[in-house]
Amino acid sequence: MPARADAGYRLHRLLAVLTWLARQGRAPVSELAERFGLGPDELIADLELAACCGLPPYTPDQLMEIMVDDEEVVANLGPELARPRRLTAAEGFALVTAARAIESVPGTDPDGALARGLEKLETVLGDRGRLRIDLGEPPYLAELRRAVEEGAQVELGYYSVSSDEESVRVVDPLSVITLDGHWYLDGYCHRAGDRRRFRVDRVLSVRPTGTSRDHPGAGEPTDADGDERPADVGAAAFVPGPDATVARVAVDDAGRWLIDAFPHLGIDRLPDGRTVITLAVASTVWFDRLLLRLGPHAEVLDPPELAASGRQAARRLLARYRAAR
Amino acid sequence: MVDRLERLTDLVLVLLRDERPRPLREIAAEVPGYPAEGEARRQAFERDKRTLRDGGIEVSALPIDGPEQVGYLIRPEDFYLPDLELEPDEQAALNLAVAGVHLGDPSGRDALWRLGLPASAGVRPFADLTALPALPVLYDAVRHRAAVTFGYRGDPRHVAPALLRFRGGWWYLVGFDLDKEASRTFRVDRMEGEPSVAEPGSAVVPDTFDPAAAHPEEPWRMGEEEVVLVDVLVDASLAPLVVAEVGESTVHDRRSDGAVVVRLEVTNVAMLRSWVLELGEHAEVLGPESVRRDMVSWLEATAAGVTGAAGD
């Protein structure tokens, strides 16, 4: 789509407003402005312009019939403008993806309104089920989603990778979201006394405490677009928090998967051809396991205190394999 | 001076009304705002056409009789969709879906606009799916059964695409590799350059091809080694999480201390090793002996550390 405010974008938006008006007949200025994300003045200006558009010879009977005052827009635009318009490839993809994603969430009615709407859409687009979304279904997902909906407080059994510990904590669930292929619970954690994000697939148990959540304000979501991660237990290793150590790891070609696997802070090359990846490490447990997976293909260049981490972790595991069974 | 938005709006209405392509001379005489004849008018019209195309409105240029030789119109089938006849509850459900699923660009909203279903604001997204520029192109190819070509690990690949799939945070294209004559799965983010798409219907897939079977579910099955059954012991603390991940049917033994042994079908031992090591000291490969030995050699090499530069 063209950038905002240029003529292409304004035309796209104006046609959308006209389609909506053609279907509705009339609408309050404020509602139209909100639906299409523009100011009332801008909306009125565009509609006044549209009222001068039409077909030659541009006599009043050939212009679009749009009456605008400060409060309301009344339009008589005929059936053609009310018709749905062809979607671009990106739009068709986005719409079907969104619908399929919702459909894949456990608990969605397979014969409900969404499924019916999607079927009509796919028939028109010629899709026939060529797009499949699998958001995963960790065991406690449905229970946690219900707790969020009902505003119920829960006691959570949780396995934290960064500390390699199981814990039990009382949490006021605020939202459940999925990103990067994992489901997360955002909530106010009473043990931490702060907002935390939990990986749902690491939840070991859920027990309602029988009370409602008592931290609606404290946990008011700050990540409105879902992109920001609050300080967290489960995914801590990926967020350069104040306690994170910055490590530089040199990998050969067989270890280059590390570049794609985690967010990194930078990439360099060594004269010997190896790649140096700079990472934020908030958890030594997590880092040890990463080094085990990289094996002999990785070398920690910095900081010195982590240089031997991989070798030591490997020795600890080897001891287990060498012990008599 | 006519506002460009006004000129564009009139242009769309005029080009849609025409049943036959008409030359620029006639169009410019009817649509206010074009410069008088000559190169400036031609340039203004070309620019308008580009703007429309960027916005998803295709202006067709067709041969006509007469000195101009080329005429223009917007074909109704290029502009309108057949009516979807969506019920109000279906419209609302699609609205909620677009609001709830974040794709990194406004395409979903734009789609609703074109359908005449503008969203009401106020729903927080609950899913964030990675958006990649190649996805709409591949989706078109899949829908139209069109062969695609793209670079992958340095080689050009020619694929009859069958399915576009999101799983575990990654997008995959599942298809039939036309050179290797076998089903293959490709990570879309690893494709090199923009995929190029052949004409609709150009992708022919053998009857025996099953896209569902072509996508292995677990990383340790993403290989072509001979199947080996591997037993992995997982201690009590992580047993429930691992069983939830690999499925109850893989549980081979439950021990009195709460630990489990899962038996996995493996066609990629390296991926299995990586998965087991991610569980740290909570998991151990029990057998078969060859896979256990592979793990021990890996750990010995890791314990010895890097002995030299690359190529060592």
Image (tube, coloured by chain):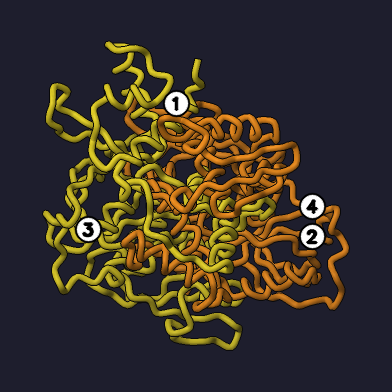
Same chain shared by disc 4 and disc 1: no
Kindly check if marks 4 and 2 are in contact, taking CB atoms under 8 A apart as contact.
Answer: no
Of tags 3 and 2, the one toward the viewer is: 3
Q: Looking at the image, which residue is at 15% across and 32% down?
A: B64
Q: Is A225 situated left or right of A194 in this image?
A: left
Q: Looking at the image, which residue is at 75% across and 41% down?
A: A71
> In the structure shown, which secondary structural element does the residue marked by tag 2 occupy?
strand
Task: Pick the residue in front: B110 or A217.
Answer: B110
Q: Looking at the image, which residue is at 79% across and 60% down?
A: A189
**What is the CA distance from the residue labelled 4 to the residue labelled 1?**
47 Å
Kind of residue at disc 3: Arg
**What is the CA distance from the residue labelled 3 to the residue labelled 4?**
47 Å
Of tags 2 and 1, the one toward the viewer is: 1
Q: Which chain does tag 1 point to?
A: B
Q: Mark 3 points at which residue?
A: B145
Q: Residues within 10 Å of mark 3 (few under 14, many from 20)?
A: many
Q: The orange chain is which one?
A: A
Q: Which chain does tag 4 point to?
A: A
* Mark linked to residue A220: 4
Q: Name the residue under label 2.
A: A189
Of tags 4 and 1, the one toward the viewer is: 1
Task: Pick the residue in front: A183 or A128.
Answer: A128
Q: Residues within 10 Å of mark 2 (few under 14, many from 20)?
A: many
